[in-house]
Image: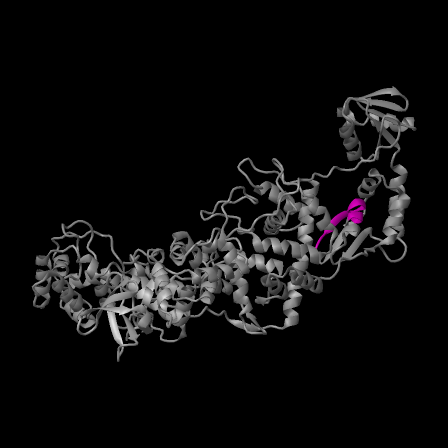
Amino acid sequence: MIPIAAESPLAAWLHRLDAGRLRDLLAARPDVARHPGPHNLGELAGRLSEQKSVARAMARLPLRCFQAAEALAALTALAPPDEGVPRDRLTTLLGDPGPGVEAALTELTQYALTWPDEDGLLRMADPLRETWPTPLGLGRGLRHLMGEKSTEDLHAVLSVVGVTPPAARHQRLTALLDHHSDPDRVAALAAAAPRETRELLAKHSRAVSEERESGSAPALRWALDRGLLVRARYGYGPARMPAEVALALRGKDWRAPFAPTPPVPALTPVSEEAVAGEAAAAAYAFAGQAASVLAACAAEPPARLKTGGVGTRELARLSATAQCGETEVRLVLETAVAAGLLARDGDRFPVTDAYDQWVERDPAFRVAALLRAWWSIAGSPTRSRDAEGRVLPALVDGVPPRNDRLAARRALLGAAARLPAGRGARDVLAFGAAVAWHRPMARRLDDDSPPFATLLREATMFGVLARGTLSPLGAALRSGDEERLAETARRLLPAATERARIGGDLTAVVTGAPSARLERLLDAVADREARGTASVWRFTPASVRRALDVGGTAESIETDLTAVTDGPLPQPLVYLITDAARRHGRLQVVAAACVIHADEPALITEILYHRRLAGLGLRLLAPTVLVSRTPVNDTLSALRDQGYAPVSETADGTVRVERPERARAKPVPAQRRYGVPRVDPGDLDLLAVRLAAVRTETERVISDLATDLPRSEIRLLAHAIDNDRPVTIECEDESELLTIHDISLEAPGIYARCEGDNARRRFLISRLVGVLTPR
């Protein structure tokens, strides 16, 4: 005799799926296909029932699935052990006979979180059912609460409610279940209760109460005597209301919360041109801010706090230097690290070699690189305070990944993409409710009020959302096509500006984003005064002297500036450059501890007796030579602070060109995205086909003997044998169909009892010509 191995309800359902549906299930739950893949459907059922896997799957489902699953969990508590829930009971409880419940069940079944058994009853995964200790505010069913009561206890309750107690204990429990499952009877019974008892019952019907009332209280005693409330057999713990009673007391019209469709924000007409224009302006502005923040990081890498991250002082410094808000600084820093442009090196965050390539590219490339980084960050880059209101540093180390943030970003762009064409949300914050519907798990972990305000602000800053709808940049980002994203950014964002307007007021104005070459030139010879859609630089004696200090000459500066402007340079600027060059180098400083010399004795004398230079420790060696006790760099700074324009010389008398050192961090490896690793579609196809072909030992024996049965009917018979299910068979030597049960396999035949006469008979498997599900 072949031994029978009982299957779990989930494994039994999996056996009824073909390779195509198994493949869809594996694609929806890729974590269960992890290497090494499951060897059979029983192992697959075990992986699908793991708590972490179930939680991961639920995190991807919308609110209607959560609500349908919670209602199903409540009804499962009322069903007999190891039995499912009729679909119509769930539909009635949710109050939606339309497509909403069907859509929720379809999605839950797609993820193998719920499924129909052979009788069409709904089953659910155990970890999913345990998600709600008190689903819908309901406790355990009467069957469970009264299960430990003695037959005398059941007799007493039935007598009080007016039901003649049967003789056997299980019959008494069944009679009490029949009585308390009738909403009209329970409502009538509660209506006859004293006022204090009615108030107590109303409180318990709304939610499970942990309050312990005295067992001698008249109000509680009245409810306990009639089974409307139940206490443990020996009176310990709070009184519990059976779920059947709570549902009855809530009324026939009470329905479980159910939102079949996502909320739609108030809409307003928008044009494609307006959306593209606003998105381009936002992205263009952010590209300039990112360039400014990272330029400040390149000049002076932000310091790291001892406790980790970049603190408020450094954020304020970067904000002032880059002339943008702290929110923008946080977003740039986080996305730059994710894009590999910035990396931690000890107690600093210097830029990497990748930054040098990034800064040379146009604004479209810069924005696309940071957008891709933002799309993959498992956190909220601009979040500045924790749940207790404490200030958070940026770039905090060791923060656990938050996959809910990734899910929320995708839900936001999905909700925006589903808006009607030519319509946008009147208030962009209204998208928060739609994101909460699509990803309720993410909403539970979100601290913002209104919901997802931080995420919506970031999307608006990047130009992903514009005029309350999805912008072309957002659509390209959502597609996952990097080439499309780069092309969309190039189409929306204008190319970098190569020309500047230099005026007689000693200013240079650049409309749009300056190219890297133009920006380096103007930063070297002038001081930046404004950023934005137009950037402004101002030429000063100190800024021109700065250009001369790094090896420039009056002729080279004029040539470089003439090349980026139309027409000749204004006369005031030429005079400024000429005068600065004439004064530049009149003093020479050499390191000997430090030596100052000049061709003019009067200039040396002036410096020697300058009161504000007394701290340098100067001493006259010769009419044209001074010695300073201060190091050369500090001496140079002090002289320049007092308006002089010295140059530094090497030991052999040549001018030493001063070039600031640029800190660079070591390249960092590409960051792996958090979440479940992708599984190759081809591997899923092969795994699904292999699992569909794997048969139980019972199925193998039957398939060897039943040459006239198709595969589906062989599986049906094998499943009936393994799970002690009835089945209808058609035999060559029988004139009618027979429904059999209590089946055992003893090759080359089966032994079973026939419905009707209950006689045990033997049937040859080779003589079977049909197997059907019994009606």
Asked whether residue 522 is drawn in magenta, I would say yes
Q: Residue furthest right?
A: 599
Q: Nearer the viewer, residue 628 or 239?
A: 239
Render colour scheme: one colour
Q: Nearer the viewer, residue 364 or 210?
A: 364
Q: Nearer the viewer, residue 301 or 754?
A: 754
Rendering coords of residue 253 (x, y %):
28, 73
* 554 relative to 371, above or below: above
Residue 492 visible (yes or no) = yes
Rendering coords of residue 267 (x, y %):
53, 72
* 77 relative to 619, above or below: below
Quadrant occupied by the N terminus: bottom left
Query: What residue appears at the point 66 percent right and 51 percent down from the top-left corner?
Result: 290
Is 187 positioned to the left or the right of 566 in the image? left
Is 266 positioned to the left or the right of 562 in the image? left
Which corner quadrant of the image does residue 79 belong to? bottom left
Query: What residue appears at the point 12 percent right and 63 percent down from the top-left corner?
Result: 172
Asked whether residue 269 is drawn in magenta, I would say no
Residue 433 visible (yes or no) = no
* 151 relative to 546, above or below: below
Which corner quadrant of the image does residue 25 belong to? bottom left
Rendering coords of residue 225 (x, y %):
11, 60
Rendering coords of residue 703 (x, y %):
37, 65
Magenta-drawn segment:
520-532
Q: How many marks?
A: 0
Which corner quadrant of the image does residue 617 belong to? top right
Quadrant occupied by the C terminus: bottom left
